[in-house]
Image: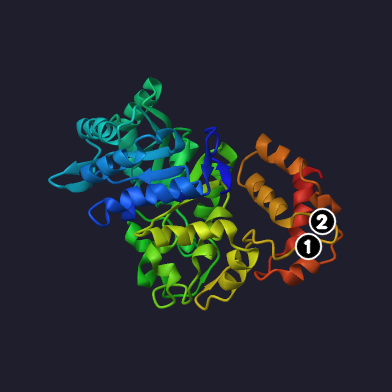
Amino acid sequence: MNYRELGSTGLKVSEIALGCEGMTEDNYSMCAKLFDVAEQSGINYFDLYSSDPELRAAIGKALKGRREKFIIQSHLCSVWKDGQYMRSRNLQEVKAAFEDSLKLLQVDYIDVGMIHYCDALDDWDAIINNGVLGYARELKSQGKIKHIGLSSHNPQVALKAVASHSIEVLMFSVNPCYDLQPASEDVEDLWADEAYSHHLTNMDPEREKLYETCQSLGVGITVMKCFGGGDLLNAELSPAGAALSVNQCIAYALSRPAVACVLAGAHSVEQLKESLAFENAPDSERDYALALASFPKISWEGHCMYCSHCEPCPVKIDIADVTKFLNLAKSSDSIPETVREHYRVLKHHAGECIQCGSCEKRCPFGVRIRENMKEARKVFGL
């Protein structure tokens, strides 16, 4: 298992993490089975968005004797009301639900307290003004949560929260089709047929700015909906008009700036193992670039996807890293010190580019790499 830094939290998390969608299968008996596989395979991070008390209790039982082996991302504002899950901004309900979760999980603290499901700008304002964010900060000061997070599908909202320096972790929906869609307060818009009825080109700039801002500010991203609810794995259901594999979806998400892990939902042990197979998959099975370039309904023409198809460079420049650092620098008013230093420690810099153009001949997306190298040399001075 490969482990990644979760932003600036100091936590190292398994890049394949565990979602909770399938844990209720077989009358909740699937929960213990998935945690057994997780422990055996090196998964050390999981998400619990559900407020279902039976699920919380099942996870508490599964964690018994191995709490220290798992980093818990659990959601504030996810409450159980009238026998069903609901999102709440009522502070009394939020507090009661959190204390209930600690009790049922049989833990003293949560590693990442995730403020649940904020997709509207006025909702983010409400979280600030009605005391929810203040409560999260209070819990952190008490040691009941170690880090504050936010889950969202809307890049505008997520960017506002990240830029406020109020959160340390962002749970966000990342996949090649979602990344083309503009911000919306209705998550259903991300997958609506009409949203893909015309030919789409290039990543939505707000999403790109969000990922790059998270990287610059040290906010770690945990990925939900990597497979688009499974639709991306099915050619008939995929809005791109073609299917990706599990490995390609995971590789795409993990190559976005600031992403630390993919929360792989699993309704069976076999499904979880399919995601875990990514860790030992050859590069040829992880490669998403040629698949994206061949999608009949979508084009990423001229947009670097950090896929490294442009390499090898004759002077050994890591073109994908140089381009990523260039984009991170351009997304900020001034170059973040961390970006500048990460660029400086590269073994080879853009200034060494001999402008041969061999990289551009190999790029499946028609990126003007030589111009990027010139710009990176100007920006970084190397």
Task: Name the one closer to the observer, 262 or 376.
Answer: 262
State whether residue 18 is above or below residue 97: below
Amino acid, disc 1: Pro
Q: Which colouring convention does the figure follow?
A: rainbow
Q: Are marks 1 and 2 in contact (CB under 8 Å)?
A: yes
Question: Which label belongs to residue 312?
Answer: 1
Left or right of 360: which side holds 216? left
Percent of width and height locating residue 79: 23, 41
Task: Name the one closer to the observer, 237 or 250.
Answer: 250
Q: Give the residue at x 80% y 61%.
A: 313
Percent of width and height locating residue 259: 53, 48
The answer to whether residue 152 shows anywhere in this view is no
Tag 1: Cα neighbours inside 10 Å, few (<14), some, or many (≥20)? some
Total labels: the figure holds 2
Left or right of 178: which side holds 211? right
Question: Which label belongs to residue 316?
Answer: 2
Left or right of 295: which side holds 36? left
Tag 2: Cα neighbours inside 10 Å, few (<14), some, or many (≥20)? few
Amino acid, disc 2: Lys
Quarter that holds the C terminus: top right
The answer to whether residue 171 shows anywhere in this view is yes
Task: Name the one closer to the observer, 350 or 141.
Answer: 141
Left or right of 137: which side holds 52? left
State whether residue 323 is above or below residue 57: below
Q: Secondary structure at mark 1?
A: loop
Question: Which label belongs to residue 173?
Answer: none
